[in-house]
Amino acid sequence: METGSRKKRVTTEGFLGIFIIIILVGLYFTAGGTQGFFSIQNIMTVLRMFSALFIASIGMTMIIITGNIDISVGAVVSVIAVVMAAISLTGAGIAVFLPVGMIVGGILCAINAFLMTKFNIPSLVITLATMQIFNGALLWAVDGSLYGLGPNWTWFSFEAIFFNYVPLYVIIVAVLLVASLLFFKYSRFIKRLYAIGNNVQGARYAGINVEKTLIIAYFIAGVLLAFSSVIFATFGTRVTTTVGNLFEMRVIAAVIVGGTSALGGSGKIYGTALGALLLSIISPALVHLGINTFWMDFFLGTIIVIAVIFSALKNIDFKSNFSKIAKKEANS
Protein backbone atom coordinates (compact mmCIF):
# COMPACT_ATOMS: atom_id res chain seq x y z
CA MET A 1 0.00 0.00 0.00
CA GLU A 2 1.37 3.39 -0.97
CA THR A 3 1.86 6.02 1.70
CA GLY A 4 1.82 9.75 1.05
CA SER A 5 0.61 11.54 -1.98
CA ARG A 6 2.24 11.34 -5.35
CA LYS A 7 4.14 14.41 -6.43
CA LYS A 8 3.01 15.79 -9.72
CA ARG A 9 5.95 16.54 -11.98
CA VAL A 10 5.95 19.04 -14.79
CA THR A 11 6.87 17.17 -17.96
CA THR A 12 9.58 18.21 -20.41
CA GLU A 13 6.87 19.41 -22.76
CA GLY A 14 5.29 21.42 -19.93
CA PHE A 15 8.59 23.14 -19.11
CA LEU A 16 9.08 23.89 -22.79
CA GLY A 17 5.60 25.37 -23.14
CA ILE A 18 6.14 27.61 -20.11
CA PHE A 19 9.55 28.66 -21.43
CA ILE A 20 8.08 29.63 -24.81
CA ILE A 21 5.34 31.71 -23.13
CA ILE A 22 7.97 33.54 -21.05
CA ILE A 23 10.03 34.25 -24.20
CA LEU A 24 6.98 35.54 -26.10
CA VAL A 25 5.94 37.82 -23.23
CA GLY A 26 9.50 39.11 -22.96
CA LEU A 27 9.68 39.73 -26.70
CA TYR A 28 6.42 41.68 -26.62
CA PHE A 29 7.94 44.21 -24.24
CA THR A 30 11.52 44.24 -25.60
CA ALA A 31 11.11 43.73 -29.35
CA GLY A 32 8.63 46.36 -30.47
CA GLY A 33 5.30 44.76 -29.58
CA THR A 34 2.78 44.62 -32.44
CA GLN A 35 4.98 46.91 -34.54
CA GLY A 36 8.07 44.74 -34.10
CA PHE A 37 8.30 41.03 -33.40
CA PHE A 38 4.51 40.63 -33.30
CA SER A 39 3.85 42.44 -36.58
CA ILE A 40 1.82 40.51 -39.14
CA GLN A 41 4.81 40.21 -41.46
CA ASN A 42 7.06 38.74 -38.77
CA ILE A 43 4.36 36.36 -37.53
CA MET A 44 4.03 35.07 -41.11
CA THR A 45 7.82 34.57 -41.21
CA VAL A 46 7.74 32.59 -37.96
CA LEU A 47 4.81 30.49 -39.21
CA ARG A 48 6.65 29.73 -42.44
CA MET A 49 9.77 28.65 -40.58
CA PHE A 50 7.70 26.62 -38.12
CA SER A 51 5.73 24.89 -40.89
CA ALA A 52 8.83 23.73 -42.77
CA LEU A 53 10.61 22.68 -39.58
CA PHE A 54 7.74 20.88 -37.88
CA ILE A 55 6.72 18.89 -40.96
CA ALA A 56 10.28 17.58 -41.34
CA SER A 57 10.47 16.96 -37.59
CA ILE A 58 7.47 14.59 -37.65
CA GLY A 59 9.50 12.04 -39.60
CA MET A 60 12.64 12.68 -37.57
CA THR A 61 10.70 12.05 -34.36
CA MET A 62 9.69 8.64 -35.70
CA ILE A 63 13.29 7.87 -36.61
CA ILE A 64 14.85 9.01 -33.33
CA ILE A 65 12.23 7.11 -31.32
CA THR A 66 13.67 3.94 -32.88
CA GLY A 67 17.13 4.90 -31.59
CA ASN A 68 18.36 5.91 -35.05
CA ILE A 69 19.01 9.20 -36.83
CA ASP A 70 19.13 10.70 -40.32
CA ILE A 71 21.63 13.50 -40.93
CA SER A 72 21.09 13.44 -44.70
CA VAL A 73 17.84 15.41 -44.29
CA GLY A 74 19.29 18.70 -45.52
CA ALA A 75 20.79 17.05 -48.60
CA VAL A 76 17.50 15.28 -49.36
CA VAL A 77 15.62 18.59 -49.08
CA SER A 78 18.07 20.11 -51.59
CA VAL A 79 17.66 17.19 -54.02
CA ILE A 80 13.87 17.39 -53.79
CA ALA A 81 13.91 21.16 -54.35
CA VAL A 82 16.12 20.90 -57.44
CA VAL A 83 14.05 18.05 -58.91
CA MET A 84 10.78 19.94 -58.35
CA ALA A 85 12.25 23.15 -59.77
CA ALA A 86 13.45 21.31 -62.88
CA ILE A 87 9.97 19.92 -63.42
CA SER A 88 8.41 23.36 -62.93
CA LEU A 89 10.63 24.74 -65.73
CA THR A 90 8.60 22.55 -68.12
CA GLY A 91 5.52 24.54 -67.12
CA ALA A 92 4.12 21.94 -64.71
CA GLY A 93 2.40 23.15 -61.55
CA ILE A 94 2.55 22.05 -57.94
CA ALA A 95 0.02 19.26 -58.58
CA VAL A 96 2.75 17.60 -60.66
CA PHE A 97 6.08 18.52 -59.07
CA LEU A 98 5.07 18.07 -55.41
CA PRO A 99 3.99 14.39 -55.77
CA VAL A 100 7.24 13.72 -57.67
CA GLY A 101 9.16 15.39 -54.84
CA MET A 102 7.35 13.20 -52.30
CA ILE A 103 8.34 10.07 -54.20
CA VAL A 104 11.97 11.21 -54.55
CA GLY A 105 12.20 12.04 -50.84
CA GLY A 106 10.62 8.76 -49.81
CA ILE A 107 12.94 6.71 -52.01
CA LEU A 108 16.13 8.50 -50.89
CA CYS A 109 15.34 8.11 -47.20
CA ALA A 110 14.20 4.51 -47.69
CA ILE A 111 17.58 3.78 -49.31
CA ASN A 112 19.21 4.99 -46.10
CA ALA A 113 17.12 2.56 -44.05
CA PHE A 114 17.67 -0.31 -46.50
CA LEU A 115 21.46 0.04 -46.42
CA MET A 116 21.39 0.47 -42.65
CA THR A 117 19.36 -2.66 -42.02
CA LYS A 118 20.71 -4.83 -44.84
CA PHE A 119 24.38 -4.35 -43.96
CA ASN A 120 23.96 -3.60 -40.25
CA ILE A 121 25.55 -0.14 -40.57
CA PRO A 122 24.89 2.47 -37.84
CA SER A 123 22.39 5.09 -39.02
CA LEU A 124 24.80 7.93 -38.23
CA VAL A 125 27.46 6.44 -40.50
CA ILE A 126 25.21 5.55 -43.44
CA THR A 127 23.33 8.86 -43.47
CA LEU A 128 26.61 10.80 -43.23
CA ALA A 129 27.80 8.90 -46.30
CA THR A 130 24.57 9.38 -48.27
CA MET A 131 24.54 13.08 -47.34
CA GLN A 132 27.89 13.43 -49.10
CA ILE A 133 26.66 11.36 -52.06
CA PHE A 134 23.47 13.39 -52.50
CA ASN A 135 25.30 16.71 -52.22
CA GLY A 136 28.00 15.54 -54.62
CA ALA A 137 25.44 14.33 -57.16
CA LEU A 138 23.69 17.71 -57.03
CA LEU A 139 26.90 19.62 -57.65
CA TRP A 140 27.67 17.31 -60.58
CA ALA A 141 24.17 17.55 -62.11
CA VAL A 142 23.42 21.25 -61.56
CA ASP A 143 25.71 24.21 -62.13
CA GLY A 144 25.03 26.03 -58.86
CA SER A 145 21.33 26.76 -59.22
CA LEU A 146 18.19 26.70 -61.32
CA TYR A 147 16.83 30.16 -62.03
CA GLY A 148 14.11 31.89 -64.02
CA LEU A 149 11.38 29.91 -62.26
CA GLY A 150 7.94 31.21 -63.13
CA PRO A 151 4.61 31.88 -61.39
CA ASN A 152 3.78 28.16 -61.46
CA TRP A 153 6.70 27.72 -59.03
CA THR A 154 6.19 30.71 -56.71
CA TRP A 155 2.38 30.26 -56.58
CA PHE A 156 2.59 28.15 -53.43
CA SER A 157 4.38 30.84 -51.38
CA PHE A 158 2.81 34.03 -52.74
CA GLU A 159 -0.63 33.29 -54.18
CA ALA A 160 -1.92 30.25 -52.26
CA ILE A 161 -3.39 32.42 -49.50
CA PHE A 162 -6.82 32.13 -47.90
CA PHE A 163 -8.81 34.92 -46.21
CA ASN A 164 -6.09 37.37 -47.34
CA TYR A 165 -3.77 36.29 -44.52
CA VAL A 166 -3.58 32.48 -44.14
CA PRO A 167 -1.02 30.78 -46.42
CA LEU A 168 -1.78 27.29 -47.69
CA TYR A 169 1.27 25.88 -45.89
CA VAL A 170 -0.18 26.98 -42.54
CA ILE A 171 -3.34 24.99 -43.30
CA ILE A 172 -1.22 22.00 -44.36
CA VAL A 173 0.85 22.10 -41.15
CA ALA A 174 -2.31 22.42 -39.04
CA VAL A 175 -3.78 19.33 -40.71
CA LEU A 176 -0.51 17.41 -40.29
CA LEU A 177 -0.26 18.46 -36.64
CA VAL A 178 -3.72 17.06 -35.85
CA ALA A 179 -3.09 13.95 -37.98
CA SER A 180 0.28 13.29 -36.34
CA LEU A 181 -1.17 13.71 -32.84
CA LEU A 182 -3.82 11.09 -33.62
CA PHE A 183 -1.30 8.86 -35.42
CA PHE A 184 1.16 8.89 -32.51
CA LYS A 185 -1.60 8.20 -30.00
CA TYR A 186 -3.53 5.43 -31.71
CA SER A 187 -1.34 3.86 -34.43
CA ARG A 188 0.04 0.36 -33.91
CA PHE A 189 2.89 1.33 -36.20
CA ILE A 190 4.09 3.98 -33.74
CA LYS A 191 3.91 1.42 -30.91
CA ARG A 192 6.29 -0.75 -32.96
CA LEU A 193 8.69 2.18 -33.26
CA TYR A 194 8.68 2.65 -29.48
CA ALA A 195 9.28 -1.09 -29.04
CA ILE A 196 12.26 -1.00 -31.40
CA GLY A 197 13.70 2.02 -29.61
CA ASN A 198 13.39 0.39 -26.19
CA ASN A 199 14.72 -3.05 -27.12
CA VAL A 200 15.42 -4.14 -30.69
CA GLN A 201 15.85 -7.81 -29.81
CA GLY A 202 12.74 -7.75 -27.66
CA ALA A 203 10.81 -6.22 -30.56
CA ARG A 204 11.94 -9.10 -32.79
CA TYR A 205 10.85 -11.65 -30.19
CA ALA A 206 7.46 -9.90 -30.12
CA GLY A 207 7.08 -10.59 -33.84
CA ILE A 208 7.92 -7.13 -35.18
CA ASN A 209 9.67 -7.03 -38.53
CA VAL A 210 12.28 -4.46 -37.48
CA GLU A 211 13.87 -4.01 -40.91
CA LYS A 212 10.56 -3.44 -42.70
CA THR A 213 9.31 -1.10 -39.97
CA LEU A 214 12.45 1.05 -40.15
CA ILE A 215 12.29 1.28 -43.94
CA ILE A 216 8.65 2.41 -43.75
CA ALA A 217 9.49 4.99 -41.06
CA TYR A 218 12.32 6.43 -43.14
CA PHE A 219 10.13 6.42 -46.26
CA ILE A 220 7.39 8.40 -44.47
CA ALA A 221 10.02 10.85 -43.21
CA GLY A 222 11.27 11.34 -46.78
CA VAL A 223 7.77 11.94 -48.14
CA LEU A 224 7.19 14.64 -45.51
CA LEU A 225 10.47 16.34 -46.46
CA ALA A 226 8.92 17.25 -49.81
CA PHE A 227 6.48 19.58 -48.03
CA SER A 228 9.31 21.25 -46.12
CA SER A 229 11.27 21.59 -49.35
CA VAL A 230 8.44 23.23 -51.25
CA ILE A 231 7.87 25.72 -48.40
CA PHE A 232 11.54 26.70 -48.48
CA ALA A 233 12.22 26.66 -52.19
CA THR A 234 9.13 28.33 -53.70
CA PHE A 235 9.88 31.57 -51.85
CA GLY A 236 11.98 32.77 -54.79
CA THR A 237 12.52 32.38 -58.52
CA ARG A 238 15.87 30.66 -58.02
CA VAL A 239 16.74 27.34 -56.34
CA THR A 240 20.32 26.60 -55.31
CA THR A 241 21.86 23.21 -54.64
CA THR A 242 22.45 24.28 -51.03
CA VAL A 243 18.88 25.23 -50.15
CA GLY A 244 18.72 22.52 -47.46
CA ASN A 245 22.21 23.01 -46.00
CA LEU A 246 22.31 22.40 -42.20
CA PHE A 247 18.54 22.00 -42.10
CA GLU A 248 19.10 18.60 -40.48
CA MET A 249 20.59 20.32 -37.41
CA ARG A 250 17.44 22.33 -36.83
CA VAL A 251 15.24 19.28 -37.36
CA ILE A 252 17.22 17.12 -34.94
CA ALA A 253 17.32 20.00 -32.43
CA ALA A 254 13.53 20.46 -32.62
CA VAL A 255 12.99 16.77 -31.86
CA ILE A 256 15.51 16.53 -29.01
CA VAL A 257 14.47 19.86 -27.46
CA GLY A 258 10.86 18.64 -27.67
CA GLY A 259 11.65 15.84 -25.22
CA THR A 260 12.29 12.87 -27.50
CA SER A 261 15.09 10.78 -26.01
CA ALA A 262 18.28 10.82 -28.08
CA LEU A 263 18.67 7.17 -27.07
CA GLY A 264 15.27 6.23 -28.49
CA GLY A 265 12.22 4.63 -26.95
CA SER A 266 10.36 7.76 -25.84
CA GLY A 267 9.04 11.02 -27.25
CA LYS A 268 5.82 12.86 -28.02
CA ILE A 269 4.87 14.69 -31.18
CA TYR A 270 3.41 17.70 -29.36
CA GLY A 271 6.80 18.11 -27.69
CA THR A 272 8.37 18.17 -31.14
CA ALA A 273 5.86 20.83 -32.21
CA LEU A 274 6.89 22.98 -29.24
CA GLY A 275 10.57 22.41 -30.02
CA ALA A 276 10.02 23.48 -33.64
CA LEU A 277 8.13 26.57 -32.46
CA LEU A 278 10.95 27.57 -30.10
CA LEU A 279 13.60 27.24 -32.82
CA SER A 280 11.40 29.16 -35.28
CA ILE A 281 11.17 32.05 -32.81
CA ILE A 282 14.89 32.36 -32.03
CA SER A 283 16.21 33.74 -35.34
CA PRO A 284 13.54 36.46 -35.84
CA ALA A 285 13.86 37.31 -32.13
CA LEU A 286 17.60 37.93 -32.52
CA VAL A 287 16.93 40.23 -35.47
CA HIS A 288 14.37 42.32 -33.56
CA LEU A 289 16.63 42.49 -30.51
CA GLY A 290 19.47 43.79 -32.65
CA ILE A 291 21.66 40.73 -32.02
CA ASN A 292 23.81 39.38 -34.86
CA THR A 293 22.17 36.28 -36.35
CA PHE A 294 25.58 34.56 -36.35
CA TRP A 295 24.73 33.84 -32.71
CA MET A 296 21.95 31.55 -33.96
CA ASP A 297 24.37 28.62 -34.31
CA PHE A 298 25.67 29.24 -30.79
CA PHE A 299 22.15 29.23 -29.31
CA LEU A 300 21.18 26.19 -31.39
CA GLY A 301 24.21 24.21 -30.21
CA THR A 302 23.66 25.24 -26.59
CA ILE A 303 20.01 24.23 -26.72
CA ILE A 304 20.91 20.81 -28.16
CA VAL A 305 23.55 20.19 -25.46
CA ILE A 306 21.15 21.16 -22.65
CA ALA A 307 18.37 19.01 -24.14
CA VAL A 308 20.65 15.97 -24.55
CA ILE A 309 21.96 16.30 -20.97
CA PHE A 310 18.41 16.60 -19.65
CA SER A 311 17.37 13.58 -21.72
CA ALA A 312 20.32 11.55 -20.37
CA LEU A 313 19.53 12.48 -16.76
CA LYS A 314 15.89 11.56 -17.28
CA ASN A 315 16.96 8.21 -18.75
CA ILE A 316 19.23 7.52 -15.74
CA ASP A 317 16.33 8.38 -13.41
CA PHE A 318 14.07 6.02 -15.35
CA LYS A 319 16.59 3.16 -15.12
CA SER A 320 17.07 3.78 -11.39
CA ASN A 321 13.33 3.70 -10.73
CA PHE A 322 12.94 0.62 -12.91
CA SER A 323 15.67 -1.18 -10.95
CA LYS A 324 14.04 -0.29 -7.63
CA ILE A 325 10.66 -1.56 -8.81
CA ALA A 326 12.20 -4.78 -10.15
CA LYS A 327 14.07 -5.38 -6.87
CA LYS A 328 10.92 -4.70 -4.86
CA GLU A 329 8.92 -7.15 -6.97
CA ALA A 330 11.65 -9.80 -6.61
CA ASN A 331 11.66 -9.50 -2.79
CA SER A 332 7.86 -9.56 -2.40
Image (tube, grey):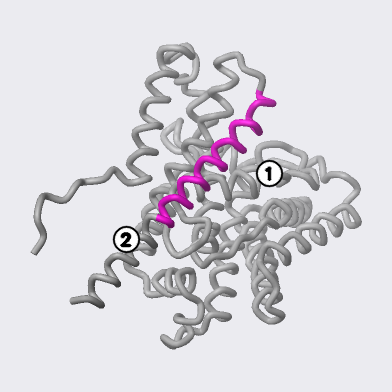
**Magenta region includes residue 100:** no
Pointer 1: residues within 10 angstroms few (<14), some, or many (20+)?
many
What SS does tag 2 mark? helix
Magenta stretch, residue numbers: 293-316
The residue lying at 48 percent from left, 52 percent from top is 312
Residue 91 visible in the current orientation: no
**Magenta region includes residue 312:** yes
Does residue 315 lie above or below 244 as drawn?
below
Q: Residue furthest front?
A: 331
The residue lying at 52 percent from left, 51 percent from top is 55
Residue 292 visible in the current orientation: yes
Disc marking residue 45: none
Coordinates of residue 197 in the picture (x, y in percent): 48, 69
Q: Nearer the viewer, residue 151 or 54?
A: 54
The residue pinned by badge 1 equals 233
Mark 2 and mark 1: Cα distance apart in space: 47 Å
Q: In what quadrant of the picture does the C terminus appear? A: bottom left
- Count of marks overlaid on the render: 2
For badge 1, the amino acid type reads Ala
The residue pinned by badge 2 equals 321
Coordinates of residue 193 in the picture (x, y in percent): 46, 70
Coordinates of residue 301 in the picture (x, y in percent): 62, 38
Q: Nearer the viewer, residue 270 or 325?
A: 325
Q: Nearer the viewer, residue 129 or 67?
A: 67
Q: Main secondary structure of the magenta part?
A: helix
Q: Is residue 178 left or right of residue 99?
A: left
Q: Is residue 12 left or right of residue 310?
A: left
For badge 2, the amino acid type reads Asn
Pointer 2: residues within 10 angstroms few (<14), some, or many (20+)?
few
